[in-house]
Image (cartoon, grey):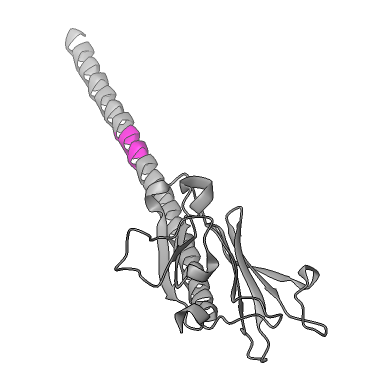
Amino acid sequence: MKIKHLHFQMHFNQQGISLVEVVVATAIMAIIVSMASALIIEGTRVQDFISQQSDAVAEANKSLTNITKYLRESADGDNGEYAIVESNGTTFSFYSDIDADNNTELISYYLNGTNLIESVIEPTGDPLTYLEENAEESILSTHVINQTVYSNNIFTYYNSDYPADTTNNPLTEPVDITEISLVQIHLDININPNRIPDTSIVETFTQIRNLKTNL
C-alpha cells in the first residue's frame, strides 16, 4: 500500500508540472500577441500619418507652383493701381492676368486658421473696378501651421539688391511695396501639430518680372 501510494503521488506531481507549463506558455503567447497587435496598430497609424502628410505636402507644392506662376506675371491693375497692393507676413495681394482674358485680376493670399486661402476678384464696370463682393475664394493648402505653432511668416520680401545686400534684406514691415523684387513663400505643413518633428517645409523664391521698378 505504501508503494502504490508513492506511485500515485509521483504521477500527480508530473501532471501538475505539465499544467504549469501550459499556463506559462499561454501567458507568453498572450504577451507576444498583445505586443504584435500593438506594433501593427502603431504601424498602421504611422502609415496613415505618412500618407496624409504626403498628400498635404503635395497640395502645398501645387499651391506654390500656382502662386509663383501668377506672381511672375503680375502687372498693374486695370484701375491704374500698382501691381502689388498689400504685403505682410501672412497676406499678399497683387494684380495678375491669371486667366488670359486681357484683364488683370486682383489676387490675394492669406492664412485663415491653418488654411491658405486664395481670393480672386475680376474687374467689372466702366471704368473697371475691383469689388470685394465679387471675390471668389478657395482653399489652396491645408494644415499650414506657420502661425498656430511656429509664428513663421508665409511671405518674406526682398529688394533688387538681394542677395548682395543682406543688411537691408529681408525688407522689414511695414514693407514699401515699390521696393519688392523677390518674394519668399514658406509653408510649414503638419497634419498633426502635436508631432512637431514631422513638420514638412515647402518653400520657394519668386522673382517678379514685370514691375516698373525692375525694368
The question of residue 24 being in magenta is answered with no
- Residue 211 visible to the viewer: no
Q: Is residue 213 above or below residue 52?
A: below
Range covered by the magenta-colored residues = 25-32
In screen coordinates, is 130 left or right of 154? right
Image quadrant in which you'd find residue 20: top left
Q: Is residue 157 above or below residue 36?
A: below
Where is residue 84 drawn, in percent x and y?
58, 72
Q: Residue furthest left?
A: 3
In screen coordinates, is 7 left or right of 124? left
188 or 134: which is nearer to us?
134
- Residue 151 visible to the viewer: yes
181 or 4: which is nearer to us?
181
Query: Which quadrant of the figure contains the N terminus?
Result: top left
Image quadrant in which you'd find residue 135: bottom right
In screen coordinates, is 15 left or right of 180? left
Where is residue 90 drawn, in percent x and y?
55, 58
In screen coordinates, is 80 left or right of 199? right
Which secondary structure dominates the residues rendered in magenta?
helix
Report the residue at 52% width, 70% height from top.
178
